[in-house]
Each structure stands twice: as C-alpha cells, then as structure tokens.
Amino acid sequence: LADGTCLDLCSTNRKDNTGYDMKHLFIGAEGTLGIITKINLSCPRLPSSRNAAFLALDTFDAVRRTLTMAKDELGECLAAFEFMDRAILELVGKQHRIPVSVDGGSELYRFYLLVETQGSNGGHDSEKMATFLERTMESGNVVVDGVLSQDMKQVQEMWNIREACNPTLKGTGHNYKYDISIPISQYYEIADEMKARLAASRPDILCVNWGHVIDGNLHFNVTTPGVFEEDPEILYLIEPYLFESVVRKRGSISAEHGLGRCKNEYLGSLAKNEAAVAKMKALKNVFDPNGILNPGKFLPTRST
C-alpha cells in the first residue's frame, strides 16, 4: 500500500467468507489503491478436444440467432464465440486467406463468427458441433456458409485470422480505438450509427469492428488509411458522441480495457453516478490519502 503496508490476500482456499473479499478492490483499480506484488493462479487442464468453425452471415439478427443456437446445442462445450465484420476481414484478408467467401471469390460476407468448443471427449464434442452447424444451416436466413476445422492446424489458422485484427489495423493508419459493452440486441447498431455519422463529414475514414459478442463486448475502431497522425476533427466527431450513444443504449464506455486517463473524466456522468464515484474517492483516500499511487488515472481529477 501507499504507506508501506503489505496485505497478504493470497489465500488458495476456494471458499473463504471471513470478512470482506478485499482482493477485488485491487483487481482492475489500475494501481491506484496499491501495487500487486504476487498472485495465485488457478490453471485448468488443457482440453483434450477442440473444434472450431468459421461461419459467414448476412445480418446481425442472424448472428444473434446463431448465438442462441450455440448456447442451446453446445452448452458447456462452448468456449469462444468471436465476431468480425467484413471491413476488418477485408484488411486481414490481404495477409491471411479467409476460408469462406461469396461463391468462393474475393467478395466477403457482411459478418463472420469464429466458434470454438473445448472438452474432454472428442467424439461427443464433435457430434455436438455437427448438430449445431446442421441446425444453423438448415434454419434458413441464419448461417449462409461455413467451414469446420478438420485438425488442430486448421483451428489455429482460424484463430490466426481473429488475432490478426488488431495488428493489421495498427499497420493501416492511425487508430481510434474503443472498447465498449452494448446489449446484444443493439450490438451492431452502434457501429452502423457511427459509420453514418462519420461518413457524412469524413468519407476518407474506415470503421472496422470485431469483438466478443457472447458477452456484449465490441471493439469499435476507426482508422485513416495511410495517415498515422491523430486528426482532431475525427476525434471530435467520435467523442463524446460515441460514449453518449453507448449510455443511451445502457451499455458501458469501458468493457475490459480500463479507464486510464482517457475516460476517467466521464466517471460520474457517463459512467456510474456521482454517489458511486464519491464512495470510490473515499476508498482511494483510505488506501492512498496523499494521492501518490498512479496519480491522475482511473478516478476523475475534477472536483465534484
């Protein structure tokens, strides 16, 4: 802690209901309450069975319906449900072969999903994946095309496409990156809304999106191809409009990447309420009364 106290919160007991569970105060606090010097990790066994499918879809409603079917058919085996739109895969496709396209040509479908199962019984897991794919492709207006991995090499090739999204975009131009949570019913509406807003003034920009749709997390990205310097006009078009739209949709302006000093000033207005922020500041004062731990980060610096 800021005063030199060391708190040992490293109990390995699965259940320990003695007092407040203080470790959760420090997780995600971005070093503003204390410095974590040691952790205990629970490492599950690697799965003996993995299957992956790369699926193409024409509408986001089809994405939602596929997610529902995946939860119904795959259940406990469902390990990943990753979303990518056409714009990002058109960039990634310059370096990686996209395994599913319109009539096998260069044109891509509007949306793609990478679905993975993990388990301990290869036959059982493969049968569940086959049943899931059969249902999605026979239901009409859901999955329009797709491929199923035949071995671990193909599983990795599918993941290479997903994992290439961020580095590929980084090499395209300046990135305006946003990590947001949106209710799945409105997940891609925010992207369409922002595309229309930006295109009206700056048709030279590109909006690309991917994310963890299973928990409503969207990585909304804007880039200026060939231009690697930040443009204040573009930033003004995005912020705070994007954040305000997210809040109107009852989402979160920061899903998993934290607040830092780019979003912390929105605490109390577009994230959490003033009462919650006041309690956060009170906690900060208890653990770091002199404000020496990561100053200017996480909590808003303005006075309330």
Image: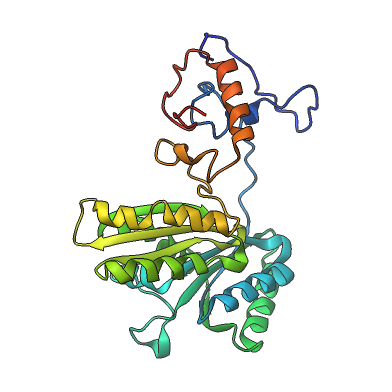
Q: In the rendered view, tell whether residue 24 sits above or below residue 157.
A: above
Q: How is the image coloured?
A: rainbow
Q: Give the x, y percent position of residue 112.
A: 48, 73
Is residue 278 left or right of 179 when viewed as pictured?
A: right
Q: Give the x, y percent position of residue 204.
A: 24, 68
- Please name the residue shown 27% across and 67% down the image: 202
Judge by depth and name the residue closer to the eye, 121 or 97: 97
Judge by depth and name the residue closer to the eye, 217 or 75: 217
Q: In the rendered view, tell whether residue 208 sits above or below residue 31.
A: below
Furthest toward the front, the residue is 304
Q: In the rendered view, tell whether residue 11 sits above or below residue 216.
A: above
Is residue 99 left or right of 127 when viewed as pictured?
A: left
Q: Give the x, y percent position of residue 150.
A: 53, 73
- Report if residue 23 is visible in the image: yes
| Quadrant including the N terminus | top right
- Report if residue 171 is visible in the image: no
How many discs appear? 0
| Residue 75 figure quarter | bottom right
Q: In the rendered view, tell whether residue 16 sits above or below residue 155.
A: above
Q: Give the x, y percent position of residue 36.
A: 53, 24
- Please name the residue shown 48% across and 44% down the image: 257
| Residue 205 figure quarter | bottom left
